[in-house]
Image: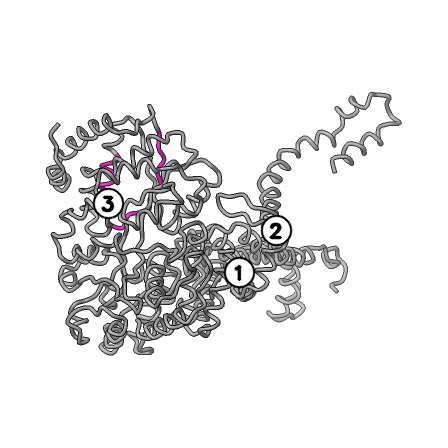
């Protein structure tokens, strides 16, 4: 067998028949050499988040097929939307049957850590083999010394903007500080090319950008001892800033869900937002002239002086009650192995970013300079817990939209600053008791 | 209940025969009836009573998803008592139920009266009326979500084309707009059920009553007030009970349209319960919110019970 990484990337990218057989031959050799010996006739039920980019899903199913052919295991894949995945996984965790692997978002394993299979050996194997994990991977995957989930990739929420509109608003490049960002949004509104970010219950979009906003001002829900500190002057400043932004936004952002900004942006009504790369990918396909006018930027840096972004990791967990723990481990290891992972992350076209250092070299990050900012997503991301420990409390807090509602309460004028902070504090204290 | 079923026949047959208790039991129709009832009772206990009591029990614990909880007494309820979001959800639920039920009843009754007339293509029109009820709730909710979209609403678009407004209507982004929008969607969906059921009721009213009233010189309104309405009362009681229960426990429509937003302004108790219990993992607290719905539902059933009681006029007496 003489398949190096590069030839396999090419093969994967070409999507030809040859690539399929290559992958199968490789997979068989891989299964022979793998430290995780798949149980005979293993059946794996896997639930994953529903794809946003079709090519990614195609590539994923291809590696599933290769794994099945090489090991004799049978994998049943079900797709669930963001909002349905977590409740379904939770029910399975509670009832103890139905699924073996769940590929979910944020801190899903931390919602029911006792039900997660210890994956420390898988993470050690992968880390040693592929250049090591980024620090955020440990934050997401580990509880204490134990890995309860393996972060496969993160979906970056970065600024998507129309180059022409930003130029017309008087900015040669996208502002890197908060004052510049607000000025830009004001100018965009004046030019009738508004910005807009979700203030509604959008699990992905609203949580990511509003946590960035809070953290960029130095406000946090809890400190490093998990003591609630949301009621602070820093939070108040973040709220003021959030309201100032909200007033420049396109109307209706309080009702937005995860797809609202994509639709508005592609319809040409929205000119700046925070989103994954999906808008750009869709525009390239359907509206090339718009895609040429789109670029991406990191979120501005606030008074704290360092990036405070929150991105959306997709972490895979195996349930403790699975009958085929080795098959589950083998599948995760197989998926993150270079010959599978490189074409897969290439197919995602920048929508997904890696947690293992080796994959910085993937050509997807340099082929189109507009995707380059997304390369560093997993390096830059904090966790939903902020300063605190990522666990079921942090997972509950983000799932209950405490921070999102606090900002929305003040921005829409339903409560004053004190009321908004006190409400969030009260809710957070109950979760962190 | 089981005891009385056993004892009663035994008492009745004692003087007539000297058979053993077992033989008596074997030939007892009531005892047999008890066995016939058992499967139904089993299903009810397993799928209705058990989940209900489990829910009530959970509301007294701090159970989270994936972890058993401990008994904490009324702590969940105390917390909810001071939770403005919970009280807003109670207010929303009552507003939603009252406004939507009244509107559904008025429109439904009006439709039923219209459909009861001799129209061309009567069967076809009656079938068409049912469409909103047949479409799966989630589908119609998604249709409404587009209709109410902050950027692409067909209503906003049309009004803009007509030049009546100069900016999009913020249907789901403003708390009161969002409440009325969700209520409208619920009414749209619920009217056919009421209209068709009332229509069925109307058709049981004997035409001879109307003929007699017409001969006596009764006006349209008098015929409705003194014939149609009283004869329809039992059906109205049943259909409105169902309607109120469905509306009070509505979940899908709100969840698909607003997820309880903007800033919790359209959370009903059912959606808030789901949000807290399943999405955020606080099963105990979510169960407490569900349990808090029970008194309201019991009250609705009580009113219906009163409405269903046999009236004097139904047995030929005067109407009081």
Few, some or many C-alpha atoms within 10 Å of disc 1 (few <14, some 14-19, many ≥20)?
Answer: many
Q: Measured from the top left, where is residue B53 in percent x and y?
A: 62, 45
Taking depth in this image into account, of A242 and A165 the one nearest to the observer is A242
Which element is circle 1 on? helix
Q: Which mark is residue B66?
A: none
Few, some or many C-alpha atoms within 10 Å of disc 2 (few <14, some 14-19, many ≥20)?
Answer: some
Residue on which the image places disc 3? A356
If the image is split into quadrants, where does the N terminus of chain B sit? top right
Which element is circle 3 on? loop
Taking depth in this image into account, of A346 and A211 the one nearest to the observer is A211
Residue A60 on the magenta span: yes
Q: Measured from the top left, where is residue B274 in percent x and y?
A: 49, 53
Q: Residue at x 22, y 42 (%)?
A: A58
Judge whether B98 appears above or below A356 on screen.
Answer: below
If the image is split into quadrants, where does the C terminus of chain B sit? bottom right
Distance, label 3 to label 2, CA atoms, is 44 Å
Which element is circle 2 on? loop
First in sequence: mark 1 vs mark 2: 2
Q: Is residue A378 left or right of residue A111?
A: left
Residue on which the image places disc 2? B72
Q: Do the residues bearing badges 3 and 2 touch, measured as CB atoms within 8 Å?
A: no
Judge whether A113 appears above or below B158 on screen.
Answer: above
* Callout 3: chain: A
Taking depth in this image into account, of A341 and B247 the one nearest to the observer is A341
């Amino acid at each position: 067998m003489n398949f190096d990484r590069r030839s396999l990337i090419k093969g994967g990218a070409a999507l030809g028949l040859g690539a399929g057989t290559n992958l199968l031959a490789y997979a068989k050799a891989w299964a022979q050499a793998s430290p995780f010996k798949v149980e005979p006739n293993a059946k794996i039920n896997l639930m994953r988040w529903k794809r946003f980019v079709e090519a990614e899903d195609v590539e994923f199913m291809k590696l599933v097929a290769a794994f099945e052919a090489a090991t004799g295991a049978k994998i049943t894949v079900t797709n669930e939307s963001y909002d349905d995945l977590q409740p379904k996984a939770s029910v399975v965790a509670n009832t103890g049957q139905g699924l073996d692997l769940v590929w979910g978002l944020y801190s899903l394993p931390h919602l029911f850590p006792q039900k997660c299979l210890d994956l420390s050996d898988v993470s050690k194997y992968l880390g040693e083999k592929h250049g090591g994990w980024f620090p955020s991977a440990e934050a997401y995957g580990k509880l204490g010394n134990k890995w309860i989930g393996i972060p496969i990739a993160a979906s970056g929420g970065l600024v998507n903007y129309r180059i022409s509109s930003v130029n017309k608003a008087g900015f040669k490049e996208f502002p890197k500080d908060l004052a510049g960002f607000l000025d830009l949004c004001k100018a965009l509104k004046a030019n009738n090319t508004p910005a807009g970010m979700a203030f509604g219950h959008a699990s992905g979009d609203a949580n990511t950008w509003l946590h960035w906003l809070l953290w960029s001002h130095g406000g946090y829900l809890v400190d490093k001892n998990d003591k609630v500190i949301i009621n602070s002057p820093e939070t108040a400043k973040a709220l003021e800033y959030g309201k100032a932004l909200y007033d420049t936004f396109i109307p209706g952002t309080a009702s937005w869900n995860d797809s609202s900004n994509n639709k508005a942006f592609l319809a040409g009504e929205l000119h700046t937002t925070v989103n994954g790369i999906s808008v750009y990918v869709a525009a390239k396909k359907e509206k090339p002239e718009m895609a040429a006018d789109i670029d991406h930027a990191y979120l501005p840096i606030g008074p704290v002086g360092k990036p405070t972004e929150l991105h959306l990791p997709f972490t895979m967990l195996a349930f403790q009650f699975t009958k085929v723990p080795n098959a589950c481990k083998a599948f995760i290891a197989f998926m993150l192995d270079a010959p599978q992972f490189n074409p897969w992350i290439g197919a995602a076209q920048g929508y997904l970013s890696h947690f293992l250092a080796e994959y910085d070299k993937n050509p997807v990050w340099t082929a189109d300079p507009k995707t380059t900012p997304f390369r560093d997503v997993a390096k830059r991301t904090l966790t939903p817990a902020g300063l605190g420990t990522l666990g079921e409390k942090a997972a509950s807090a983000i799932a209950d939209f405490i921070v999102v509602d606090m900002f929305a309460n003040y921005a829409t004028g339903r409560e004053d600053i004190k009321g908004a902070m006190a409400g969030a504090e009260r809710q957070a204290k109950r979760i962190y008791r | 209940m089981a005891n009385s079923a056993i004892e009663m026949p035994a008492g009745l047959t004692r003087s007539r025969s000297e058979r053993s208790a077992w033989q008596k039991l074997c030939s007892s129709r009531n005892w047999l009836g008890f066995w016939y009832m058992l499967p139904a009772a089993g299903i009810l206990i397993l799928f209705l009573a058990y989940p209900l009591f489990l829910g009530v029990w959970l509301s007294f614990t701090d159970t989270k998803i994936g972890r058993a909880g401990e008994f904490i007494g009324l702590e969940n309820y105390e917390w909810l008592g001071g939770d403005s979001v919970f009280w807003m959800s109670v207010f929303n639920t009552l507003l939603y139920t009252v406004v939507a039920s009244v509107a559904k009843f008025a429109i439904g009754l009006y439709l039923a009266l219209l459909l009861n007339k001799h129209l061309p293509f009567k069967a076809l029109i009656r079938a068409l009326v049912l469409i909103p009820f047949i479409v799966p709730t989630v589908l119609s909710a998604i249709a409404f979500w587009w209709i109410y979209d902050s950027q692409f609403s067909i209503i906003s678009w049309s009004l803009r084309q007509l030049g009546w407004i100069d900016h999009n209507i913020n249907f789901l982004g403003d708390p009161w707009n969002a409440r009325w929008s969700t209520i409208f969607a619920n009414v749209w969906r619920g009217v056919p059920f009421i209209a068709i059921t009332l229509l069925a009721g109307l058709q049981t009213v004997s035409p001879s009553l109307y003929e007699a009233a017409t001969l006596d010189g009764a006006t349209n309104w008098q015929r409705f007030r003194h014939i149609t309405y009283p004869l329809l009362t039992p059906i109205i009681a049943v259909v409105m009970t169902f309607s109120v229960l469905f509306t009070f426990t509505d979940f899908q429509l709100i969840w698909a349209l607003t997820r309880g937003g903007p800033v919790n302004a359209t959370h009903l108790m059912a959606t808030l319960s789901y949000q807290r219990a399943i999405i955020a993992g606080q099963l105990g607290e979510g169960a407490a919110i569900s349990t808090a719905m029970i008194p309201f539902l019991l009250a609705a059933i009580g009113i219906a019970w009163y409405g269903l009681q046999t009236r004097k006029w139904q047995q030929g007496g005067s109407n009081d």
